[in-house]
Image: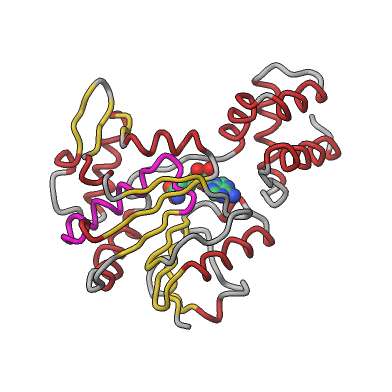
């Protein structure tokens, strides 16, 4: 429906006016999402759409929310969390302080899942979980630790498969259709906006999780993000990606050793 030239102009203008670089997002998925938004919001003229995207801040926010894929869940891929619980976190637990970065955290379900594991290993008090995303709207949701009750049954099942130790309901209070997760978990989290292809390194971490984000990037954006993770990981730190993602064939692969299970790599040098 939109021409290639129009998509290219939109990408250029979003960068020029808002500093958001979408040039390295998988073209087909970017086009699909932009066209859906264009139709959903009743545009018939591309220049009207472009002008709203360029100069109306609220519309731009709405556009970012619609273009980025924010689907997530607690204990997504439970076997990954089981490995984290039994093999990775016990090693980190021997350190005086544990720093974790959730890059592309969406609405925070992944961060709360890891905080629960840290609590069950009695190391939450000496851990800090940094959670970042390019989309400020999802961070606002994440900070509250409020998740719809209708999703909790599935999350509790994931938690159980991930070898959860407690009754999942110990971690939240149900109220008005939402599960409010405990402040004890939230107190160890720092949320901030960060763009993986534009912003630099901001700390050194023992574990970086960037799950189901690189899948939307082309090779060049993946390289930028992976080099950023390499720079931001301490020696012997771990990098965890989503099930369909890899560091194979990247510029950083020779510095990492893949863990036998799951998409987890250890930084060796
Ligand atoms: C599908 S969600 C993944 C959430 C979670 N990590 C998980 O696996 O369930 C992808 C997230 O990546 C974020 N994202 C996309 N491009 C990004 C970028 N350049 N920098 C930081 N975050 C980005 C999106 O806003 C979205 O919240």
155 in the magenta segment = no
106 in the magenta segment = yes
Residue at figure coordinates x 52%, y 58% from the top left: 244
16 horizontally vs 121: left or right: right
19 horizontally vs 149: left or right: right
The image's colour scheme reads: secondary structure
Residue at figure coordinates x 18%, y 61% from the top left: 121
133 horizontally vs 216: left or right: left
Picture quadrant where residue 246 is located: bottom right
In the rendered image, residue 110, in percent from the top left (x then y), is placed at 37, 48
Is 250 located above or below residue 171 in the figure? below
Picture quadrant where residue 79 is located: bottom left
Along the line of sight, which residue is nearer the eye, 152 or 179?
A: 179
Question: How many marks on residues?
Answer: 0
109 horizontally vs 45: left or right: left
In the rendered image, residue 260, in percent from the top left (x then y), is placed at 39, 75
Picture quadrant where residue 237 is located: bottom left
In the rendered image, residue 206, in percent from the top left (x then y), is placed at 37, 68
Residue at figure coordinates x 50%, y 46% from the top left: 133
Is 44 located above or below residue 94 in the figure? above
Quadrant, the N terminus: top right
In the rendered image, residue 160, in percent from the top left (x then y), is placed at 21, 50
**Residue pushed farthest front?**
202
Q: Which residues are magenta?
A: 103-123
């Amino acid at each position: 429906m939109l021409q290639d030239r129009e998509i290219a102009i939109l990408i250029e203008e979003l960068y020029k006016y808002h500093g958001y670089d979408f040039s390295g997002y998988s073209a087909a998925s970017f086009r699909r999402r932009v066209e859906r938004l264009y139709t959903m919001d009743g545009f018939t003229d591309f220049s009207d759409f472009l002008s709203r995207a360029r100069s109306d801040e609220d519309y731009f926010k709405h556009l970012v929310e619609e273009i980025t894929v924010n689907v997530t869940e607690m204990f997504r891929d439970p076997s990954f969390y089981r490995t984290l619980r039994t093999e990775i976190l016990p090693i980190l637990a021997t350190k005086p302080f544990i720093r974790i970065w959730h890059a592309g955290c969406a609405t925070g379900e992944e961060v709360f899942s890891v905080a629960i594991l840290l609590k069950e290993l009695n190391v939450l008090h000496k851990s800090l979980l940094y959670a970042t995303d390019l989309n400020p709207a999802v961070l606002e949701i994440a900070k509250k630790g409020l998740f719809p009750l209708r999703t909790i049954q599935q999350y509790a099942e994931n938690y159980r498969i991930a070898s959860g130790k407690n009754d999942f309901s110990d971690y939240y209070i149900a109220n008005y259709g939402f599960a409010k997760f405990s402040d004890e978990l939230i107190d160890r989290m720092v949320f901030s906006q960060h763009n993986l292809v534009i912003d630099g390194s901001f700390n050194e971490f023992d574990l970086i999780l960037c799950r189901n984000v690189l899948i939307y990037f082309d090779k060049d954006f993946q390289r930028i993000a992976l080099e950023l993770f390499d720079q931001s990981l301490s020696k012997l730190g771990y990098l965890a990606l989503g099930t369909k993602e890899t560091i194979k064939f990247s510029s950083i692969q020779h510095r990492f050793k893949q863990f036998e299970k799951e998409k987890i790599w250890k930084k060796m040098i």
